[in-house]
Every structure is written in structure tokens, then in C-alpha cells.
Image: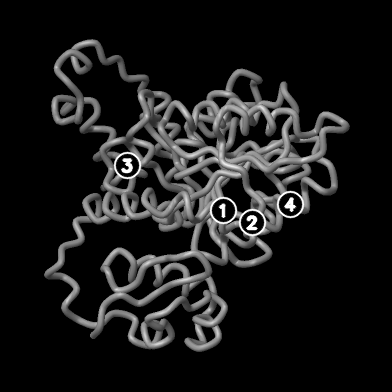
Amino acid sequence: MEVDDLRQRLEHERQALPLSDHLLHSLVIDYQKVDVALEWQQQAADHHLLCFSDPLYPPLLKQLSDPPAVLFVKGCLEALALPYLAIVGSRNASPGGLQVAYQLAAEMSSMGFGICSGMAMGIDGAAHKACVDHQGRTIAVLGTGIEIIYPRKHRQLYHDIQRQGCILSEFWPDTGPFAGNFPKRNRIISGLSLGTLVVEACRKSGSLITARLAMEQGREVFAVPGSILGGYHQGCHDLLRDGAKLVETAADIVEELASLTAYHLEELKLCHHIQQGEICNLPFSSLLASVGYETTSIDAVVEHSGKTIDLVLEQMLELELQGWVIAVPGGYVRVKRS
């Protein structure tokens, strides 16, 4: 739909908006902000606006008590379809913490999960970089407008993420880095994700806000234990005492997320209207031939199929949606014969 058509519908056909009568009656539209958003969308092919009623709006995010009314997305929109794990932690992380975040993000990425974080310094940046380095999908949820790169040191990472995932924000494109917006965006990080992993955090770390929100949203919470010296892990230890799952390897996470991953895939089927009758033809035959009826690693699928890992992850997700394979710890298993 063209920008002019959208603008006209908002102005003259507001009754068609997917809102209750009460909200429609009290609705006040700021047309200047609407125009800014629509003009931003038209600037590039990888600029996307997602409203709550859009079929591509992430189904897990719809479960929040206060989901964003609109999402500004920059990059690969299809990246939103993956099951995600949030990885968060200290901005002033130790070298060991950065290494653990990078390693776990890389392992989860190799198992077909996307990584969601906030593009902050420290643990966030390490998790995003692992996905970029290993050609995995990652989402960066900003506490600024989508055109404001913060911190500036992550300018290159900001552009790298868009090639393999997407940048996302609920704030208008030119919104600056206001302190109050960063805790607000944390509900989106946890809301997009099946679970939240805190790698390293002191007791006053902002990442604990994300973990608390994940608990309130009914999602899994994980924490990496560490030394009692230095205070780097006090927040993680508090989470573990409160019932978070202790994590040493990616397998510890995948075991807990299996049921939520199945639910996520079912929700995607409903959102994208995927019906059983639509899968009579054999999809991605060369890729299916690379997956056995026992666990097949993603590396083996890539090597056997001859496809890039980015394409393999995208097509494997489609095969999951159609019921041909399932993701398991260590890779994929084929569950249906042609």
C-alpha cells in the first residue's frame, strides 16, 4: 500500500483500525509523527514498519501486557521468525564473561536459535558479534530511535547485524539516548525471546530488569554462575537462588526451551496461515536429503547441502514450520518421509 493511501485511511477510515470502540473514540492521531514514520519506511527497501495487527508482528511479543503499537525494523524482516534466546549482562564485563557470552551465543546460533540483545557494550556486544562471525541471526533492540547508533563504538556492529538479522526499535527514528527508554526496551528483548540468559551481572545491573520481565512474562530465565570474588556475578547468583536455571553449556538451555520452541512454531503457522494441505510438494529437496532420522549437526547440513549457513538456517526454519524436521540439541532430526 502506498504512503498516500495509508495516510488517507488513517485520516478518513479510522473505524477500520483494529481497535475497540472505546479506544477509537479516544484516539488522537499525531499526523506529523505518522508522516515521519511513513517517510522513513520509504527511504530504503530494508526499512519496515510493523503494527500490532500485521501478520509479521512477532506472536510472542503480542503476549505482553503492553506490547509496542508499532515497531521500526531495519534489516532482514524474515529474521523475526526464528525462535530467539535473549543474552544480556554487564556493560563492564570481565574478559571471561565476554568469552562465555560469545561462546554460548555461537553454540545457540549453530543449533538454529537467533540471539536477541540490546547492542550495549559488554555482554550484549559479544553475543551479537558471535552471531555475525558465525553467520547466525541476531536482533538488536535499541533504546534509541532506529537511526541513532548508541553506543557509537558499535557503529560497525550496527551495520553488520542488519545483513544477517535486524535492528528494532519502538521509538521514532530520531529519538536520542534518554535514560528512561533503556529499561523500557528491555521488555521487548525478553518479550521477543523464549528465554533470557544473564551471563554476568552485579546486583545493580540493568540486565536484571530484563530477567525480571522475562519471569513476569512467563519465559525461562537462565544464569551463568561465577566467582564470588569481585562482585561480577552477584546478580546471577541471586537469580539462581530465585529459581533461574544454571547454565554451563548451550545444551542446558536447549533442554528447557524445547516445549516453548514447539509453541513458537505453532504460533508462526497460525500467523502465516500455513496449512497442512499446502505442503504436499517436497520442499528444499537437497536440504532434506542432508538431514537424517537421527541428530544431524547444522555444520553437517551445510557441508552436505552445499548451501550457505544463512540460507540453510532460513530454509530449515521453513522445514520446521512444515513439519519435516525438528530442532533438537546438537542439530536437527528429520521426522517425516517424502
Q: Are marks 2 and 1 in contact (CB under 8 Å)?
A: yes
Q: Residues within 10 Å of mark 3 (few under 14, many from 20)?
A: few
Q: Where is residue 3 in the image (x, y as percent from the top left)?
A: 32, 41
Q: Distance between the residues labelled 1 and 4?
A: 14 Å
Residue 172 location (% of width, % of height): 50, 30
The percent position of residue 79, horizontal first and vertical second, equals 45, 56
Nearer the observer, 334 or 318 = 334
Q: What type is the residue that disc 2 sits on?
A: Thr
Looking at the image, is mark 1 or mark 4 earlier in the sequence? 4
Q: Which of marks 1 and 4 is in front?
A: 1
Q: In which quarter of the image is residue 119?
A: top right
The mark found on residue 100 in the picture is 4
Q: Which of marks 3 and 1 is in front?
A: 1
Residue at mark 3: 3
Q: Which amino acid does label 3 sit on?
A: Val
The secondary element bearing badge 4 is classed as helix
Quadrant the C terminus occupies: bottom left
Real-space Cα separation, disc 3 to disc 1, in angstroms? 47 Å
In the displayed structure, does residue 47 sit left or right of residue 242? Answer: left
Circle 3 SS class: helix
Q: Name the residue under label 2.
A: 249
Kindly identify the residue that appears in the image at 24 percent across and 50 percent down. 271
> Horizontally, is 77 left or right of 175 in the view?
left
Which structural element holds mark 1?
A: helix
Compared with 3, 67 (above or below) is above
In 3D space, how far apart are the residues under numbered discs 2 and 1 (Cα atoms)? 6 Å
Q: Which amino acid does label 4 sit on?
A: Val
Lower position in the chain sequence, tag 3 or tag 1: 3
Residue at 35 percent across and 24 percent down: it is 65
Q: How far apart are marks 3 and 2 (CA)?
A: 48 Å
